[in-house]
Amino acid sequence: MKGVNGLRRKDREVKDFSEIIRIIESCDCCRLGFVDNREAYIVPLNFGYEIKGSDLTLYFHSAKEGRKIDLVSKQETVSFELDCRHKLVTGKEASDYSFLYQCVMGKGTLEIVDCEEEKKHGLSIIMDHYSDKKDWSFDHRILERVSVLKLSVKELSAKAHCHNG
């Protein structure tokens, strides 16, 4: 996986992969960015993540129909963004104000998971992100009604502004 070039504020860049994962752990929403007829289409989703070596995979659940599902097969690459730890820093002057945050951005390939076992795996990864419970089971009828999306991350960058200055 390669980094995304072009960060303006190099002093806020997070390069350490483990720190990037800690930021992802703190996020509760991932926004996917598609291109639809030359227009941006951004959708916020619940997600889960999996790390194998230096490979990062994001999983999402979705309805089986809709604009997002229609766009998956039309995209060679999708963009994503996650952010957390927002805090406004105030001051006496407008120039003293700032905003603290952490964010992760990147690109990758998105696919719809068809195999039932991989769907279960993806849904378990999502549930693990939002709960302390492990070993989830999923009714076959539920699996037939949902789509699971798998994003294989190819480019990744992160930024953090955690102090005033």
Image (cartoon, rainbow, N blue to C red):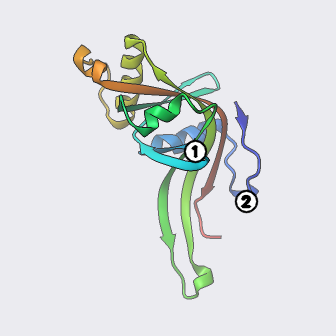
Front position in the image: 135 or 120: 120
Considering only vertical position in the picture, is 116 above or below 111?
above
Front position in the image: 165 or 115: 115
Determine the secondary structure under disc 1.
loop
Please, which residue is most extreme toward the bottom here?
A: 92
Left or right placement of residue 157 versus residue 44 in this view: right
Q: Residue at x 62, y 32 (%)?
A: 108
Residue 27 in view, yes or no: no
Q: Please state the horizontal and vertical placement of residue 142, each as a whole percent of the image.
A: 25, 22
**Tag 1: Cα neighbours inside 10 Å, few (<14), some, or many (≥20)?**
few
Residue 74 in view, yes or no: yes
From the image, state whether disc 1 or disc 2 is nearer to you. Answer: 1
Give the residue type that dot 1 points to. Asn
Q: Residue at x 36, y 31 (%)?
A: 65
Residue denoted by label 1: 37
Q: Residue at x 58, y 50 (%)?
A: 39
Residue 20: image quadrant is top right
Dot label at residue 87: none
Q: Are marks 1 and 2 in contact (CB under 8 Å)?
A: no
Q: Residue at x 39, y 34 (%)?
A: 129
Residue 54: image quadrant is top right
Q: Quadrant of the C terminus?
A: bottom right
Residue denoted by label 2: 9
Q: Label 1, label 2: how many angstroms apart (C-alpha)? A: 32 Å
Left or right placement of residue 160 versus residue 125 in this view: right
